[in-house]
């Protein structure tokens, strides 16, 4: 089922998977102020939809996102900080998994959008860079925080200080990209992965995900205590039934529901 926030943000619901598309191809899917606020609204709508389990975030017509619309910024319109403002789309992690489907460029704030997602599936020809370095536009999308946590400080500083372009293959090697796929297939591959994740018992999946995010700021024993607390509901509502399915023969040999085949070239 297709919906629109406006012509700038498109929403397509297919069972438990919601696809959110940045639709400004003439601007390389750069987000102007209106589009950034509509993206934030689309994310909130996904979170509020009890039938939606996983989202895929992508860009229209072969480009992921070129960041903030610098032409709008040059005209004197200030933009809402995407991560630093409560109104911004990247202010906090979503309450449910989001997968970035990256084709073409994910540059400047577009890199920040990809980093905000839980997983990144990218085409071989995709590229990642902090190109805003050339224009004196600082990062306000969480990139300076999320990038070093994801790939390490040394690699993050290399990308942020040099503004060099990182290919899809290099991005996979450094851990920036989770899955590398052939050109023209990224949206279908990301949606298939989203559907697989949506078929898992959701309470345990979400509590484990929440624990992963929470542990980054905690001493190890506090993080383990937090893991235990977050797992409480799943232990009570899902664990015994899941163990019974295993005992009856389900999931033998590591079989997964709706398994996605990895494209390793």
Image (tube, rainbow, N blue to C red):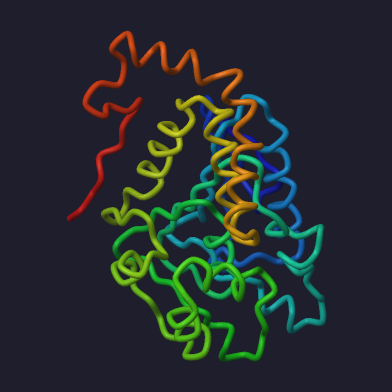
Q: Residue at x 35, y 43 (%)?
A: 189
* Residue that lies at the very extreme toward the front in this rendered image: 221
**Quadrant hosting residue 196:** top left
* Residue that lies at the very extreme toward the top in this rendered image: 248
Q: Position of residue 233 (x, y in %)?
A: 64, 26
* 158 w.r.t. 42: above or below: below
- For the C terminus, the image quarter is bottom left
Q: Position of residue 70 (x, y in %)?
A: 67, 79
Q: Residue at x 25, y 39 (%)?
A: 261
**Quadrant hosting residue 112:** bottom right
For this view, does 10 lie left or right of residue 102? Answer: right
Most foreground residue, 180 or 92: 92
* 160 w.r.t. 29: above or below: below
- For the N terminus, the image quarter is top right
Most foreground residue, 5 or 131: 131
Q: Residue at x 65, y 65 (%)?
A: 31
**Quadrant hosting residue 53:** top right
* 62 w.r.t. 11: above or below: below
For this view, does 75 lie left or right of residue 28? Answer: right
Most foreground residue, 142 or 102: 142
């Amino acid at each position: 089922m297709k919906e629109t926030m406006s012509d700038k943000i498109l929403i397509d619901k297919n069972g438990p998977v919601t696809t959110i598309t940045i639709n400004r191809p003439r601007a390389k899917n750069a987000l102007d102020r209106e589009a950034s606020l509509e993206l934030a609204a689309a994310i909130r709508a996904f979170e509020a939809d009890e039938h939606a389990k996983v989202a895929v975030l992508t860009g229209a017509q072969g480009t992921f996102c070129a960041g903030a619309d610098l032409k709008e910024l040059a005209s004197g319109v200030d933009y809402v900080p995407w991560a630093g403002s409560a109104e911004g789309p990247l202010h906090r992690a979503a309450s449910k998994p989001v997968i970035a489907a990256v084709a073409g460029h994910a540059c400047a704030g577009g890199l920040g959008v990809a980093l905000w997602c839980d997983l990144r599936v990218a085409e071989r020809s995709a590229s990642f860079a902090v190109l805003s370095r050339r224009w004196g536009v600082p990062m306000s999308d969480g990139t300076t925080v999320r990038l070093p946590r994801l790939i390490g400080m040394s690699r993050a500083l290399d990308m942020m200080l040099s503004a060099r372009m990182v290919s899809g293959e290099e991005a996979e090697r450094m851990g920036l990209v989770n899955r590398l796929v052939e050109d023209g297939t990224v949206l279908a591959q990301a949606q298939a992965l989203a559907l697989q994740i949506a078929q898992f018992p959701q309470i345990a999946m979400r509590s484990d995900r929440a624990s992963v995010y929470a542990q980054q700021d905690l001493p190890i024993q506090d993080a383990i205590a937090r893991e235990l607390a977050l797992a409480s509901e799943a232990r009570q509502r899902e664990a015994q039934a899941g163990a019974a399915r295993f005992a009856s023969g389900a999931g033998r040999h590591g079989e997964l529901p709706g398994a996605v085949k990895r494209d390793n070239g």
